[in-house]
Image (cartoon, grey):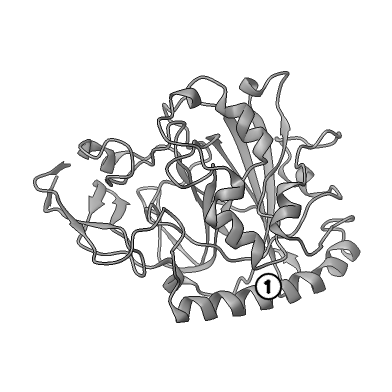
Amino acid sequence: MRIQALTLLALAAPALTHGTFEHDDLETQLLKRDFYTIGRRSLESCAGSLNSDGTNKRALLQKRSMVEVLNTPHLYTGNGIDPDHPASAFAHEHHVLLAPYGDTGPYYVPGELIRDDAREDQEGIPIIVEAQFIDFITCKPIPGMWWDMWNANATGVYSGVINESNGDFTDHSNVNNTFLRAVQLADEDGVAQIKTIFPGHYTGRTNHIHIIAHTDVTVLKNGTITGGSIAHTGQFFFDQDLIDKVSQTYHYTQNPYQVTGNKLDDTFHQETAYSASDPVFHYEYLGDSIEDGLFMWVRIGVNASANWDDGVGEHSFTYGADGGNASTVILSRCAIFSYVSPLTV
């Protein structure tokens, strides 16, 4: 696929950093308020059920602040977690249920490949990431949830997107790249696993991973999904001391962007200030050194019957059978950049 023309249109709106709006509109604020309130109450009621039915015998749920999350170490040093047995990560007492709402950010590309390894040729610290989806209405795991995950590479660049704040703006071929994006189906325990690399930081953002949870999708012959509903959007983070260690390793030392730590990241603050959540991955080392890789896990409270498609907005880029596609669509409520680009295959 070749882009014949590419015109940058700057919107007449306040500038913002990726993933965080300077001022959400009233509708968005009300949606978030209601969702956080319902989610917090529902998760609190789930704690007893998860304990009694054995889903998590020692489930922990407590109200937290950003400072508490920042000061809580998430490194697991015990035994009994096996990456080859997904549910094993969710039977330990330190795991915290998460409230189910967060910003999608402007680099979401619908229609990515169903696969369990998103790394392709990307260099960096390998990580195995697991998520367990719990319906906070029924307090049961959600089998059949589709987990859509994406993150930046070691130098802070996303695949599939052309944007002046996303790496080399003149590299139009990036619209066809798919690295560090994957979709996976949750098993009977509501658990899905994806291999990726530890994400790099970029201007205004700390290191993080994006996820969207889909329900009732259609699987296409080209190995992608379409349709259905969005039951969850969110961004998840890492302990600051872990980020600092990763940042000292090769590939991450080549990152040209100024570091923004968790404490200064607006989205980190937003997702910890408005809920009882701890949106930070628990993790353990896979070997003797950090270069050997990390195993990470998180449990996510989801309203499986919800539909948050409007919260995700429209997209300037999609991926399909013919590769990446740029469109004239402007992301809703986002002061970013849109692209007008007639495409030919």
User: Which residue was labeled with disc 1?
Assistant: 39
Would residue 184 be found to the left or right of residue 48 on screen?
left
Q: In the rendered view, would you say 261 is above or below 253?
A: below
Q: Residue at x 61, y 34 (%)?
A: 243
Q: Is residue 341 visible?
A: yes
Q: In the rendered view, would you say 107 is above or below 45?
A: above
Residue 182 on image: x %, y %: 47, 45
Q: Residue at x 87, y 58 (%)?
A: 54
Q: Is residue 144 visible?
A: no
Residue 170 on image: x %, y %: 20, 37
Q: What is the quadrant of the N terminus in the image?
A: top left
Q: In the rendered view, would you say 191 is above or below 79?
A: below
Residue 278 on image: x %, y %: 70, 55
Q: Residue at x 56, y 36 (%)?
A: 195
Q: What is the quadrant of the C terminus in the image?
A: top left
User: Tag 1: Cα neighbours inside 10 Å, few (<14), some, or many (≥20)?
Assistant: many
Would residue 140 be found to the left or right of residue 110 on screen?
right
Q: Residue at x 45, y 72 (%)?
A: 24
Residue 29 on image: x %, y %: 51, 77
Q: In the rendered view, would you say 103 is above or below 149?
A: below
Q: Which SS class for mark 1?
A: helix
In-front residue for pair 96/318: 96
Which kind of residue does numbered mark 1 sit on?
A: Gly
Total marks in image: 1
